Amino acid sequence: MKCGIRFCGGCNPRYDRGKALATLEEKFKGEVDFVIAEENVLYDLLLVIGGCTNCCASYEQFKTKEGVIKMWEETHIEKIANVIKELEF
C-alpha cells in the first residue's frame, strides 16, 4: 500500500508529528510505503498530519484511491493504524 503524507506547516504543533509518523512506519514496516505526497501521483491513501486541532494543511491537490484520513494529536495513532489495517490490500 502506498500512503501519501501531507504535513501541516507546523505553526502550532502540540506533539512531535515526525515521531508520530515514525511510529506508524514502524507498525507497518514492509507493508505500507509512507511517502511525502506529491501532486499528480495516485496514492492508495493520503494521511494529513496536523499539529493542532485546526489540521489546516491543504490536500485537495492530491489523488487517492481510498480517500483521506487526518490526525491532529498523538492519540490518533491507533485510530489511524486501525483504518490502515482495514484498507490493506
Image (cartoon, rainbow, N blue to C red):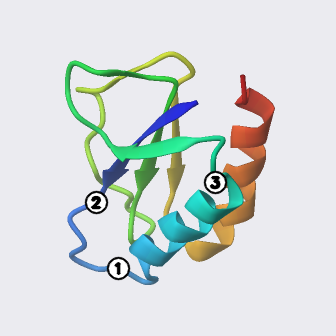
Q: In the depicted view, which residue is nearer to us: 4 or 70?
A: 4
Tell whether 48 sits left or right of 37: right
Nearest to viewer (mark 2 / mark 3) = 3
Asked if marks 2 and 1 touch (Cβ < 8 Å), the reply is: yes
Give the foreground label among 3 and 1: 3
Which residue corresponds to mark 1?
13
Question: For the residues marked 3 and 1, what is the alpha-carbon distance in whole angstroms?
Answer: 26 Å
How many marks the image carries: the answer is 3
Residue ID for mark 3: 29
Helix, strand or loop at mark 2: loop
The residue at the point 78 percent across, 47 percent down is 82
Regarding mark 1 in the picture, which secondary structure is present there? Answer: loop
Q: 89 and 55: which one is in front?
A: 89
Kind of residue sitting beneath label 1 = Pro
Tell me if label 2 and label 3 are in contact, CB under 8 Å: no
* Image height of 49 relative to 37, above or below: below
Per the model, the C-alpha gap separating discs 2 and 3 is: 24 Å
Which quadrant of the view contains residue 43? top left
Q: Amino acid at mark 3?
A: Lys
Which residue ends up furthest to the front in the rendered image? 30
How far apart, in angstroms, are the residues tagged by discs 2 and 1? 9 Å
Kindly identify the residue that appears in the image at 59 percent across and 41 percent down: 32
- Work out whether mark 2 precedes mark 3 in sequence or the reverse, and give the earlier one: 2
**Location of mark 2 (residue):** 8
Q: First in sequence, mark 2 or 1: give its number.
A: 2
Secondary structure state at the residue bearing disc 3: loop
Q: In the rendered structure, are the residues bearing label 3 and label 1 in contact, judged by CB atoms less than 8 Å apart?
A: no
